[in-house]
Amino acid sequence: MYTKTQAFVISTIKYADADLIVKCYTNSHGMLSFMLKGIRKQKRGKLNVSFFQALSYLDVEFTYRANKNLLFFNEVRVRDPFNALQRNIYKSTLSLFLAEVLQACIQEEEANKDLFYFIETSLTHLNETEKFGHFHILFLLQLSKHLGFYPNMDKQAFGYFNLVDGVFQLKETNRYCFSGKEIENLKLLLKHSYKTQAELSLKKHERTQLLELLLLYFEIQIQGFKKPMSYQVLQDVFTY
């Protein structure tokens, strides 16, 4: 089936001497992988390696074949260059981290229009905003909503958060129940959005604690999820 759709680049793998395997999250079919023959040695042509950086936003055309591991592009155009995500070292590091998170969370070849729109609006905001120190934490929280395990807010007055069940509760019932300052900060973040994150003023160590908590939450909720390899780079770059 010939398909025209939008796609976000999730990851790339060098293959053979000059090829590239690109994993994309598409609006039409979910997660798909594509083979780009000879692109790494190609000096001229319609396609350029620079098109396929983490979370590049593309218009793509291809023939979809169910149960085919690798597909081939017919046409690729940059839909929105998201210039700041590529030129700003902080935002490009965030993009790499978010792409790894999405790769670990989304495996199926199945369209999810709401999730795609969430990614699109999130990256548009990140590209445009000047205040993004809490962005990745808010992204993870909102992503959990689309994946089906957003924290239950019914009993947020209670002091413990249970990562297994995703609920706030009165007392500790397993080793994945947490309390204290990081849970109070979690409750605070749950009240904010991208648009209001400038009002937040958590210190670096507080953001690190929250990020560690949420990554553990994802590990518990999603089989096979692991802390992204870019996590340490993210910590090194965000020194403020």
Image: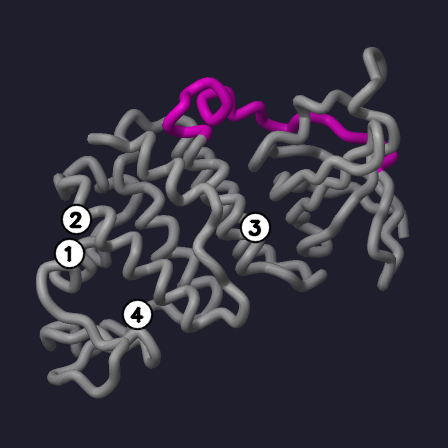
Q: Position of residue 166 (x, y in %)?
A: 31, 75
Q: Which residue is mark 3?
A: 116
Range of the magenta residues? 73-92
Q: Is residue 124 left or right of residue 48?
A: left
> Mark 2 near mark 3, Cβ–Cβ under 8 Å?
no
Which residue is the extreme one toward the top?
44
Distance in Å between CA atoms under marks 4 and 1: 13 Å
Magenta stretch encompasses residue 133:
no
Residue at (83% x, 56% y) in the render = 69
Mark 1 or 2, nearer chain start: 1
Whether label 1 touches label 2, CB < 8 Å: yes
The x, y position of residue 106, in whole percent, is 59, 59
Q: Which residue is under mark 4?
A: 151
Cα–Cα span, label 1 and label 2: 8 Å
Q: Residue at x 34, y 57 (%)?
A: 141
- With 83 as the anchor, is 198 left or right in this view? left
Label 1's element? helix
Q: Which residue is mark 2?
A: 206
